[in-house]
Each structure stands twice: as structure tokens, then as C-alpha cells.
Image (cartoon, grey):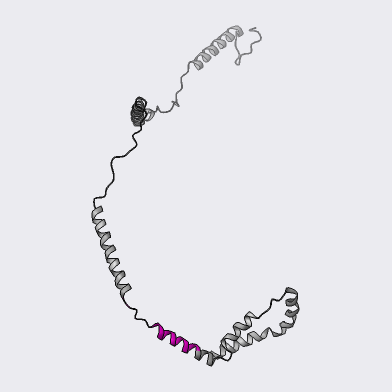
Amino acid sequence: MHRSYQPLKPVTNRYLQQRWDHNEYENHRRKVISALPVVDNKGMRTPAHVQFKLKKMQWQDERLSIIDRDNRLLASKLADIVCSKGLVDHRNQNHLRSLNADKRREELLLVGSQNRSIYQRITARQSEYRRQLWWDDWERTERRRDQISQHPRGLAEKQRSSRKVKFAAAESSESSASCSNTDRPDRETRDANQRQ
């Protein structure tokens, strides 16, 4: 086997050179396997106060103790209910009473009596308005209006009551005839505005 070995440098004995190279290679492999890292890349260790969070653990203990106490109270109440004869104490003996209820009642009675006296004074008083004078004045106004107006007042109401119902066919035939008179209401409104 040593005859087929080709060393890198010229040597006198190939067999010895092969053994030496093989030993160096084995030493090299052993050193590579047992080599330690030069750079520390493990990272920083987490501090204990960050890792354990003692305050959070304390809060959890307090919460668990509160829950345990409430459970014990509830269990004792349930035991009392089971031991009782089935009667339920649901009446509240403490009635809420206001400290100034008497004062408010007196004020309410005082206001009620004052309102009654004001109402009696108002109803006993004679009215100062003279309705008959107002009524006479209104009749005079109506007479003057009827004398001034060109058309009597009752005539328009009589005409409204005597109107007949027109059907759609009659209205469509009359609409063509009434188109020529569409500018008449505009003229009347213009004349009324000029008079004012």
C-alpha cells in the first residue's frame, strides 16, 4: 500500500512518510474534536429577579388566599342553610328614614296652604275684562268690513258649498281650454302687490 502513496514532497522512504503523515492527521483530528470555542456566544444569563417575578407570585398568593376565604364563607353559609328548617330570612328590619323628613313635610304643607289661599283669592276676584265691550267692538268691525268689501262675505261660502265634483275625463278636456287663461292669476297677484 505504501508504494501507491504519493507524498507532497520528495522523500527517500515512502512507507515511513505515509506513517508519519497518518499520525499527524490523527493528532490533528484529536485536537479538532477536543478544541474549545474561543468566542463565548452563549449569551447572558437571565437574572433571577427577572426570571422568577416575585411580586407576581405574591399577588397570586394573595388572590388565592382571598378566593379560599370566600369559598370557606360560602361553604359555611350553605351549611347553615342545609341545617336550617327551610325558612328564609328575607325581611330587612332596617327601614331607611330621612333625617329631615319632618321639615320637608312641614314645608310641603305650608306651600299647599299658600297655593290654596292664592287660588281662593283668584276665584273670588271679579274679572276686570269687559267682554261685552269687546263683543260690540268686533260686531262694529265686521259691519265696516262688509260695507267696505266689494263682494259680500257669505257669498263665497255659498259658492263653495254648491260646487259639483268633476271627473278626470272632464278635467282633461277643460285643461286645454284653461291653458289660455294661465297668465290671468299672475296679473292679479301683480296688481295686488302694486296696490300694497
| Main secondary structure found in the magenta portion | helix
Residue 109, quarter of the rendered image: bottom left
Considering only vertical position in the picture, is 19 above or below 128? above
Residue in the foreground of this view, choosing between 124 and 194 = 124
Residue 54, quarter of the rendered image: top left
Percent of width and height locating residue 3: 65, 8
Figure quadrant of the N terminus: top right
Considering only vertical position in the picture, is 26 above or below 182? above
Looking at this rendering, what residue extends furthest in the front direction? 124
Magenta span includes 138: yes
What residue is drawn where x is 31% and y is 69%? Answer: 119
Considering only vertical position in the picture, is 8 above or below 168? above
What residue is drawn where x is 63% and y is 85%? Answer: 186
What residue is drawn where x is 63% and y is 80%? Answer: 161
Magenta span includes 8: no
Percent of width and height locating residue 156: 60, 84
Q: How many numbered circles are shown? A: 0
The reply to whether residue 51 is in sight is yes
Percent of width and height locating residue 37: 46, 22
Residue in the foreground of this view, choosing between 194 and 94 = 94
Percent of width and height locating residue 66: 34, 30
Residue in the foreground of this view, choosing between 55 and 153 = 153
Residue in the foreground of this view, choosing between 59 and 150 = 150
The reply to whether residue 58 is in sight is no
Is 104 on the left-hand or right-hand side of 42?
Answer: left
Q: Which residues are magenta?
A: 125-142
Considering only vertical position in the picture, is 125 above or below 81? below
Is 176 on the left-hand or right-hand side of 92?
Answer: right
What residue is drawn where x is 53% and y is 14%? Answer: 29
